[in-house]
Amino acid sequence: MESEKSVSKEQIRYGAMFFFTGLCVLIFSIITGKSYEIILRNTIIAFLFAGTVIFMLKDAVQRGEKGFSYDNYSKQYRFFAAYMGMVLLACLISLVPNEFWPFMSLIVILSLFSNREIGLISGTGFIMIAVMLEHDGGYGEFFMYVLAGCVAVALLSDLRENTNIGYPLFISLLMQAVLLLAFNVLFQNRTFSANILILPVLNLMLNLIIELAFLNMFGVYIIRKTNDMYMEINDSEYPLFVSICEKDKNERFRAMHASYLTERICHELGYDERSAKTCVYYHRIGILDGKSRWEDIEHFYTENSFPPKALGLLKEYIEPDPGQMMSGEALAILFSEIVITSIKDLINRNKNAKIDYDKLIDDLFDGKLKDGSLKNYEVTFADYEKMRSILKKEKLYYDFLR
């Protein structure tokens, strides 16, 4: 029932996007006195544009968390709300001089609420709508804002909590300024004066205000909120983790040491360290009630507001979908836990045993290679060998396990 409801809501959302886009453009084309042919052209293009964005959204949804930036997969209403608002804005903005259009910052918003490709395509579509509806729309303003939007998205779509946005903002605004001068100021058939620069300057100021306000809110309510959640649940004193350790006294040992190795591997290979550590800590949460199926244990994670990426990795590690390739993070966790448990078992048998760590790790890795397990993971042989090398370098740490 829940899946049927979600599919129904998704279809309603896509349907609303499709028809709202076409109808808005149709109405504004009539209001602005376009000819019958232009009205028909504008409406058809608007429907095609909306259909393209919907197709890209559906493709991203099929790819799950990987199809979207940040936590947008689980918060798709953000893009929907931004899209619907910008349909109206694109129509209204066609009534003001094109030198004042703030599309550069709007494309960045659309990208941060979806992904780069969807943001660029939807932003390009809105520029196209504004150009079609304005009195004498031409290729100049279309090219200008699409190019400025591409530069801004390239610089501002991969934000972290410690990202310095000053340089990207300066470059994107400089690009916008150069394009405004090239397409608007240089070709005006009148004597140069300060009045010619009023609208371009106002354009830059408007884009700067929108971007600063939005990026600040995005950083506080999305990026920092997610980081804070990771810091909380990856704390060894977090109540949920403590309850797991109380249920099984060996869990703290396994989790703490396996998470250390996992973080080392993920850091060296550029994997997601935070979600991998979360998976190490909590993938055995089923011991709390003796259940192991994902549908029986998922509530522990959702009740504690686990970040979407961590949820995706936990689902992948606990109950992978048949035929779906598993991530490098999952393989890093697997090898880290195998190494820790193997060394622990040898120590339990004989505390003074002399362990050849290189041979132990080689045997574990070669065993996985021979039994064909690696075909289920999205890792290169270079990454595979790098994992082996990283684990071999931790001999002093393994001695500490005694």
Image (spheres, rainbow, N blue to C red):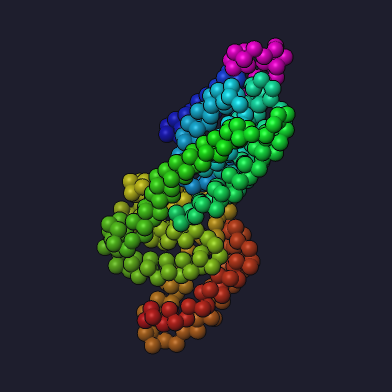
Q: Position of residue 130 (x, y in %)?
A: 62, 26
Question: Which sits in the foreground, 8 or 248?
Answer: 8
Q: Main secondary structure of the magenta part?
A: helix
Q: Please determine whether, in this image, residue 393 is positioned above or below residue 96.
A: below
Q: Based on the displayed image, in which of its 4 quarters is residue 152 positioned?
A: top right
Q: Is residue 366 magenta?
A: no
Q: Please determine whether, in this image, residue 359 is positioned above or below residue 270.
A: below
Q: Position of residue 140 (x, y in %)?
A: 71, 33
Q: Residue at x 67, y 34 (%)?
A: 192
Q: Please determine whether, in this image, residue 241 is positioned above or below residue 336.
A: above
Please indicate, yes or no, whether residue 322 appears anywhere in the rendered image.
no
Quarter in which the N terminus is drawn? top left
Please provide the residue range marked out in magenta: 26-49
Question: Which sits in the foreground, 312 or 210?
Answer: 210
Q: Please determine whether, in this image, residue 194 is positioned above or below residue 337.
A: above
Is residue 175 toward the left or the right of residue 391 in the image? right
Q: Residue at x 43, y 69 (%)?
A: 260
Q: Is residue 27 magenta?
A: yes
Please indicate, yes or no, whether residue 170 appears anywhere in the rendered image.
yes
Is residue 382 toward the left or the right of residue 336 in the image? right
Q: Position of residue 329 (x, y in %)?
A: 51, 60
Quarter in which the C terminus is drawn? bottom left
Q: Based on the displayed image, in which of its 4 quarters is residue 134 positioned?
A: top right
Is residue 227 toward the left or the right of residue 64 in the image? left
Q: Residue at x 51, y 64 (%)?
A: 266
